[in-house]
Amino acid sequence: MKKLIFLILVLTIVTAGATFAGGQQDSDKEVVLKWPCIWVGEDSKANAVASLVEQFNADNAGSINVVIEAQPDYDGYEQKIRTSIAAGIVPDIFTMKLNPTTKAYYESDLLMDFSTELGMDWGKDFNEGTVAQATVDGMVKSLPYEVAITPVWYNMDLLKKAGVSAYPKTYKEFMDTAAKLKAAGIIPTSQMTGGSNAWTSMLWYSHFLASAGGKDVYNNLFEGDAYVKAAEVLLAMYSDGNTSRDAVGGDAGVSGGHYLAEESAMFINGPWYIGRVRGDAPEVYAATEVGPAPAAGNNSGAQIGFLQTNFAAAANSDDPAKAAAAVKFIKWMTKAENVAEISKQAGSLFAVKYDASTIDDPLQKKFIEASNNAAFTIPHLAGVVPADVVSEFGQALGKMALGEATPAEFVEMLKKVNNQ
Amino acid sequence: MKTILNILKWIILIFFIFVALYPLIWLLLASFKSSNLELQQNSFGLPEKWMFINYYNAMLKAKLTSLFFHSIIVATFAVLLNLIVASMTSFVISRENFKGKAIVFTVIVAGILIPIISFMVPYFSIIQKLKLYDSLLALILVYCTINIPISVFLLTSFMESIPIELEEAATIDGASFIQRFTKVILPLSQTGLATAGTFCFIYSWNEFIMALLLTSSESSRTLQLGIRFFTSQFVTDYTAMYAAIVITIIPSIVVYFIFQNRIISGLTAGAVKG
């Protein structure tokens, strides 16, 4: 009997091996491109992207098939891409944020260099300067796609309800506004220390850095008074009820959730959030205006602007058909009319030239206006420092917000990690 | 004095019960709330309206039914494979004398101390080379392997506590090396096997990062990946996600309740061995 059980057990495992081993399959005829994609599930670009991929596959039936591998968890997605590249295996197509850490990918031969293709007519499709931002040592191993500015979103209805008639332009005006909002039971700002990069608060800090240090503030990272000054202002945002109680440890869902729920009056995020606000909180959407952060230093009217997402592809130097298919697909995704469609549905802005007159979303137009009216634009802090500093930012901010570190110590913590 | 100590004991016990159970109760209540908004405004209270539909949405949106099936397959086969390998290893280590036995045991068990994250790149490379990427078998093999150190540790301790005389009697009766393992030691190690198996099952059921790394398509996605479908880079549907989490933790709780007596006795086996 026991022999029989043992035999059954062994047979079951062998059968399981045969049944569940359906991993990678190679096809001789069709080029299959796998795309681990973050624009799925709840993402505002999900439907538009899925529809474009479907259309591309239909147009190229039998020769190219793009398979979306849904990766809704962004932090996990970044981890997966990092691990894949460390193991010397690159997804056929993927997207990434270009920063000092990901720029290191350019040094390997694993990624496709688009510079030759861009040198032909394709390069003309991109807005001026965007390709240059993605160029390292003459190589363009990631293609600028989604761009963003991240102004302050403010709910004018809530400001009016608190007796404030105009958005605050200076730090003093901001503190007066915050006091009135609190008296009316409204949280002045949305903040967060959680997530992989404390996104919302990192953007507030970047705004204050621009104001305190000007457009060259990143020339000497964590040196000079601007970093401490900006940290003092950020600390003020976390003090005296100027943000929600759950901001320490909260993630993007928390900071965005308070704004969507009309609990907080000011918030920062990029244009890709427009689709979400429009769908889930139409009153908030209608009342939202955007502008630069209140000036915390000598400079005012600055905006935070950056390449949000770049396309990349495996070099596939041993498989020219696959490489060509990847280029064909990315060209499809960067076609003006396709980009316009994603922009229209999700509210996102792109590095590709497209007919912006088709944009009928008032909030999206305000973003474009804010971008055009910016006194100057700098990237956000997470875009100019290594990944370790980005991770440290939320930790250090949490400590400062809980009173365990001064603004100077907060900056020192970041500086220490940056110098390692 | 005795009464005061008794009251103090109960206060401490109730405090720890509260700390242990509160997150679960909170999760359960949150899973019935109507929206993220209610969750934020009424974070600790009862739902205004009990939204059973969250569970339906969770099942539908993240396709939890098929993911549930995948998780069951992965966890079950990972446990079976793990127990086969670990029990054979433990038998040799605990019952046989050979040179370097202590070193072999230490090297295997040291795996418990190594953070899983450090295995990510090597496992990814191996699975890619075996052409098993995006398959359930990849997860079965990896989960089985990751749990071998803890299983060997538990089973070796357990098998060492079985009297040598039983094995000697079997040898006199003509039992071979394999028969001593299959007819004497293995049947007497059921408690240890249940303990090791439960640990392996719970790990395989809850694991996320390897599943994310080694799979990509719906055909090999597990429950823990399905839960993430309620989040995106900037948006999270918390109530549906909490409903999905409640659904996913039920099997772990069931497995633990079924085997809890064996787990406890398995963990303490060998602890009083003289």
Image (cartoon, grey):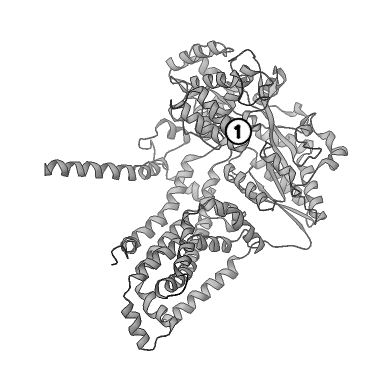
Please, what is the three-letter code of the amino acid marked with disc 1?
A: Asn
Front-lying residue, A137 or A330: A137
Q: Residue furthest right?
A: A120
- Seen in the picture, residue A240 relative to A123 is either above or below; the reply is above
Residue A192 appearing in the image: no
Circle 1 — which element?
helix
Image: B183 above or below A233: below
In this view, the residue in front, B67 or A378, is A378
- Residue B89 at least partly seen: yes
Q: Chain of mark 1?
A: A
Q: Residue at x 46, y 36 (%)?
A: B35
Percent coordinates x, y for residue B159 in the rendering: 37, 71
Which residue is under mark 1? A418
Q: Position of residue B18 (x, y in %)?
A: 30, 42
Q: Is residue A318 left or right of residue B229?
A: right
Q: Is residue B185 left or right of residue B6?
A: right
Q: What residue lies at 56% left-to-right and 32% top-to-bottom?
A: A416
Count of numbered labels shown in the rendering: 1
**Spot occupied by residue B130 in the image (x, y as percentages of width and height):** 65, 64
Where the N terminus of chain A falls, by quadrant? bottom left
Using residue B23 as the reference point, say whether residue B204 is left or right of it. Answer: right
Q: Quadrant of residue A169?
A: top right
State which quadrant residue A393 falls in: top right
Looking at the image, residue A153 lies above or below residue A179: below
Q: Position of residue B131 (x, y in %)?
A: 66, 63
